[in-house]
Image (cartoon, helix red, strand yellow):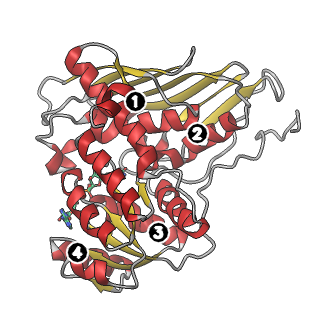
């Protein structure tokens, strides 16, 4: 590797990989906010083929079909599953309904992209993994922040050894989140980690390339908040050896957006990479991610700050579906398989047990709870 790369640093490999064949038929189940604003825009950008859509509220499926030129609106899940033109079922319903859809879809022999979180209990998440394994279908999770440009660029640098041995991962977020946009979230008791910081748990372990040992977490509410669950969290992640992770999140920032921040930083023995998560700035439109890195293995003391293309929403959704389609094409396990996602689920449930019992909780405890 050149010790003197261009002012932008080395050429980073952070964009989602696409399958050679983009003709796989995608059938979407659930036509809500995330499908309209992330799945469908991403698939259009990538050139993926959405063959049909189904929602228990038919008018939502019709609206999505009209906006995105989708040929078929199904009257039932069974109809979608019987359609030979559908290769992949893309599930985007609230987590508590996901198991029923997976049960029917796996029996149909179609491949699956499950929504995150996989389930609201570790038991059901494990059942999903076991069922998909038995059915022989490829099943992936839509835990897509791994493919957000800034995070993927960090992973590329870490994977090439440019920051040396990873020692510290830190994600800090202080914003205002309008939870009222998602009415089904209002009464949920496990809110912030299950529906938001789960992305940071998954991203951190993806960049660090290690499975954590234990989690120590705390969660709190904010006076007058309009939702039931925790909206401020601090999560300490213990990796093997001296590596550590920290997530510090507050969703109640009442100051002007100038005061908001959403940053990440990964430190290793040979360098650091740091940046901002653009999706949480200039809300709700977002802005590009930024990164900057130093590496003793390149020109020591020099900050490289390449420009990145794309956003977490929607571009990272090309990553999750693209990886599943590539895995089908290449007859291999997807990187974001539901089995891989079980580790992220263990981290999340360990965080909640830690909060409840005020102690570090080993991932192994969660894994063993359903043996
Ligand atoms: N991957 C991400 O980053 C991300 C981001 C936001 C939301 N989500 C997840 O996506 C899911 C949906 O979120 P949303 O914001 O689109 O919610 P939403 O309420 O806007 O949409 C959910 C849709 O699912 C439909 N639905 C419910 N049960 C169904 C069933 N059994 N069969 C078919 N349709 C059904 C509803 O009618 C509704 O149209 C949630 O699980 C949420 O956690 C993921």
The Cα–Cα distance between marks 2 and 1, rounded to whole angstroms, is: 15 Å
In this figure, which residue is indicated by the disc labeled 3? 43
Q: Could you tell me how many numbered marks the image carries?
A: 4
The Cα–Cα distance between marks 4 and 3, rounded to whole angstroms, is: 21 Å
Above or below 285: residue 351 = above
Q: Quadrant of residue 3?
A: top right
Above or below 88: residue 158 = above
In this figure, which residue is indicated by the disc labeled 4? 77
Label 1 SS: strand
Which tag is nearer the camera, tag 1 or tag 4? 4
Q: Which mark is on residue 290?
A: 2
- Mark 4 or 3 closer to N-term? 3
Q: Is mark 4 within 8 Å of ligand 1?
A: yes
The Cα–Cα distance between marks 4 and 2, rounded to whole angstroms, is: 41 Å
In this figure, which residue is indicated by the disc labeled 1? 173
Residue visible at 40% across and 29% down?
Answer: 173
The quarter of the image holding the N terminus is top right
The Cα–Cα distance between marks 2 and 3, rounded to whole angstroms, is: 24 Å
Which residue occupies the foreground of this view, 206 or 32? 206
């Amino acid at each position: 590797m050149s010790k003197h790369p261009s002012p932008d640093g080395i050429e980073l490999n952070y964009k989602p990989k696409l399958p050679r064949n983009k003709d796989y038929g995608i059938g979407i189940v659930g036509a809500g906010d995330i499908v309209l604003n992330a799945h469908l825009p991403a698939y259009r950008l990538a050139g993926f083929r959405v063959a049909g859509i189904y929602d228990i509220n038919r008018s939502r499926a019709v609206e999505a079909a009209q906006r995105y030129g989708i040929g078929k609106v199904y009257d039932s899940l069974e109809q979608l599953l019987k359609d030979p033109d559908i290769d992949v079922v893309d599930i985007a319903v609230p987590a508590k309904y996901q198991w029923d859809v997976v049960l029917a879809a796996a029996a149909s022999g179609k491949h699956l992209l499950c929504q995150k979180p996989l389930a609201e209990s570790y038991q059901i998440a494990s059942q999903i993994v076991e069922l998909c394994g038995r059915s022989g279908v490829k099943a992936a999770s839509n835990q897509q922040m791994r493919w957000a440009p800034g995070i993927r660029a960090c992973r590329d640098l870490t994977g090439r050894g440019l920051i040396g041995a990873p020692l510290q991962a830190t994600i800090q977020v202080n914003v205002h989140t309008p939870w009222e946009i998602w009415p089904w979230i209002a009464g949920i008791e496990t809110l912030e980690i299950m529906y938001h910081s789960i992305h940071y748990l998954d991203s951190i372990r993806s960049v660090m390339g290690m499975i954590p040992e234990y989690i120590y977490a705390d969660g709190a509410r904010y006076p007058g908040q309009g939702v039931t669950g925790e909206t401020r969290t601090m999560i300490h992640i213990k990796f093997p050896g001296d590596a550590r992770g920290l997530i510090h999140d507050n969703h109640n920032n009442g100051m002007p957006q100038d005061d908001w921040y959403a940053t990440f930083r990964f430190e290793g023995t040979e360098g650091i990479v740091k940046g901002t998560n653009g999706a949480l700035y200039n809300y709700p439109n977002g802005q590009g991610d930024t990164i900057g890195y130093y590496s003793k293995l390149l020109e020591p003391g020099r900050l490289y700050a390449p420009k990145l293309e794309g956003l977490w929403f929607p571009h990272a959704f090309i990553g999750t579906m693209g990886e599943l389609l590539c895995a089908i094409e290449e007859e291999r396990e997807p990187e974001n398989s539901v089995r891989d996602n079980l580790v992220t689920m263990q981290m999340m449930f360990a965080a909640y047990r830690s909060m409840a019992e005020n102690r570090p909780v080993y991932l192994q405890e969660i894994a063993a709870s359903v043996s």
